[in-house]
């Protein structure tokens, strides 16, 4: 079976489409971007998930199974739409759609075999329209980034969360989570005999010599002072002017480092399970 979700884009949203409008995230997951024939701007997004078992689509067929019996597809699609919203935001600084407002309950369901066609003839799919959002600003999308960043969607979501907030302290924490994602401090010394700061500096320094071990240590200590009210070097409180200035001075460094890691992830980074990885 194949499930298709339509994500409509507000007609006032001026986002330029990439040359390649279909992105295959996995052999079973495709994203297709449609433009308005008159303006050439992005109009809607189609998310297609193929090769689904009957168990996954049964809740969306009339009179077949109670909807509460399985929410597998709904959870998978939620992960995918969160990632898609994040990766587009990173490129455009625009919330093209709010994944929390998208109707994931009733996708369009299509058969992929004659047997499945017979099943859908007996149990027609249920479907409902998605929510239209409203933004009126412009940007552009690089389709290759949507596929490339899909290797590490959790890190992408952290980075996008940082870019979406106006709170500088929260921005710093979210950018630092990208670093922690790629370099797990809890791994044993047998796996990584080098200290955390040294490992980060060795990898990042290969792409930008600014990131020495001392710079990484300072970035890490500032993060600790943000989140721990009894940090050894003194906490950084949002109400203190010196704390605000410290964050302002160092925020560009941690943001640039987080972006560097998205562009050049280390080979030994966590091998996270992809959304819909079992499809």
Image: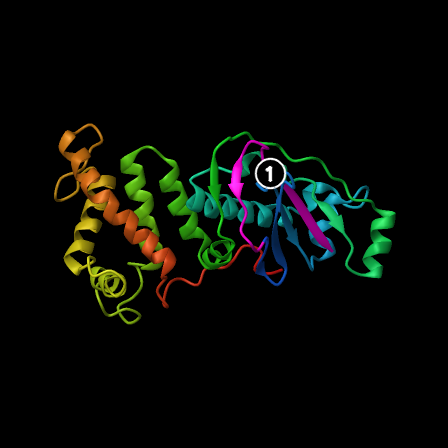
Residue labelled with disc 1: 39
> What residue is rendered at 29% in x and 50% in y?
256
Quarter of the image with the N terminus in it: bottom right
Q: Residue furthest bottom?
A: 190
- Is residue 192 one of those drawn in magenta? no
**Rendered image quadrant of residue 107:** top right
Against 231, residue 179 (above or below) is: below
Q: Position of residue 275 (x, y in %)?
A: 54, 54
Q: Is residue 227 left or right of residue 27?
A: left
Give above or below for 224 relative to 262: above
- The residue that appears at 32% across and 59% down in the rendered structure is 184
Q: Which residues are magenta?
A: 1-20
In the current view of this chain or complex, which residue is farthest to the top? 239
**Number of residues whose C-alpha sits closer than 10 Å to that of mark 1, classed few (under 14), some (14–19) or many (20 or more):** few
Q: What's the residue at 33%, 49% (across, down)?
A: 177
Q: How is colour applied across the structure in the image?
A: rainbow
Tell me the SS state at disc 1.
Answer: loop
* Residue at the extreme front of the image, as rendered: 38
Question: Residue at coordinates 49% horizontally, 57% vertically from top-left?
Answer: 144
In this view, the residue in front, 124 or 189, is 124
- Quarter of the picture containing the C terminus is bottom right
Q: Is residue 250 left or right of residue 40?
A: left
Q: Which quadrant would residue 20 be assigned to in this image?
A: bottom right
Q: Position of residue 237 (x, y in %)?
A: 20, 33
Residue 17 colored in magenta in the image: yes
Q: Against 126, is 191 above or below?
A: below
Position in image of residue 215 (x %, y %):
17, 54
Say above or below: 155 vs 13. Answer: below
């Amino acid at each position: 079976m194949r499930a298709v979700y339509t994500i409509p884009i507000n007609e006032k949203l001026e986002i330029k489409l990439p040359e390649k409008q279909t992105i295959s995230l996995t052999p079973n997951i495709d994203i297709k971007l449609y433009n308005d024939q008159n303006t050439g701007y992005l109009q809607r997004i189609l998310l297609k998930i193929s090769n689904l078992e009957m168990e996954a689509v049964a809740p969306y067929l009339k009179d077949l199974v109670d909807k509460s019996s399985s929410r597998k597809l709904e959870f998978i699609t939620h992960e995918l739409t969160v990632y898609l919203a994040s990766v587009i935001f990173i490129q455009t600084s625009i919330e093209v759609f709010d994944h929390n407002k998208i109707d994931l309950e009733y996708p369009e369901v299509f058969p992929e075999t004659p047997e499945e066609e017979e099943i859908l003839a007996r149990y027609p799919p249920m479907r409902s329209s998605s929510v239209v959002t409203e933004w009126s600003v412009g940007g552009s999308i690089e389709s290759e980034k949507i596929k490339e960043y899909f290797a590490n969607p959790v890190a992408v979501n952290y980075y996008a969360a940082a870019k979406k907030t106006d709170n500088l302290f929260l921005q710093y924490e979210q950018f630092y989570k990208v670093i922690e994602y790629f370099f797990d401090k809890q791994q044993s010394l047998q796996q990584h005999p080098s200290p955390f700061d040294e490992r980060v500096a060795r990898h990042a320094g290969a792409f930008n010599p600014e990131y020495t071990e001392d710079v990484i240590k300072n970035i890490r200590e500032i993060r600790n002072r943000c989140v721990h009210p009894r940090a050894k070097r003194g906490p950084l409180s949002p109400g203190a002017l010196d704390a605000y200035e410290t964050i302002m001075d160092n925020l560009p460094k941690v943001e640039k480092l987080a972006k560097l890691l998205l562009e050049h992830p280390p080979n030994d980074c966590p091998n996270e399970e992809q959304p819909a990885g079992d499809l």
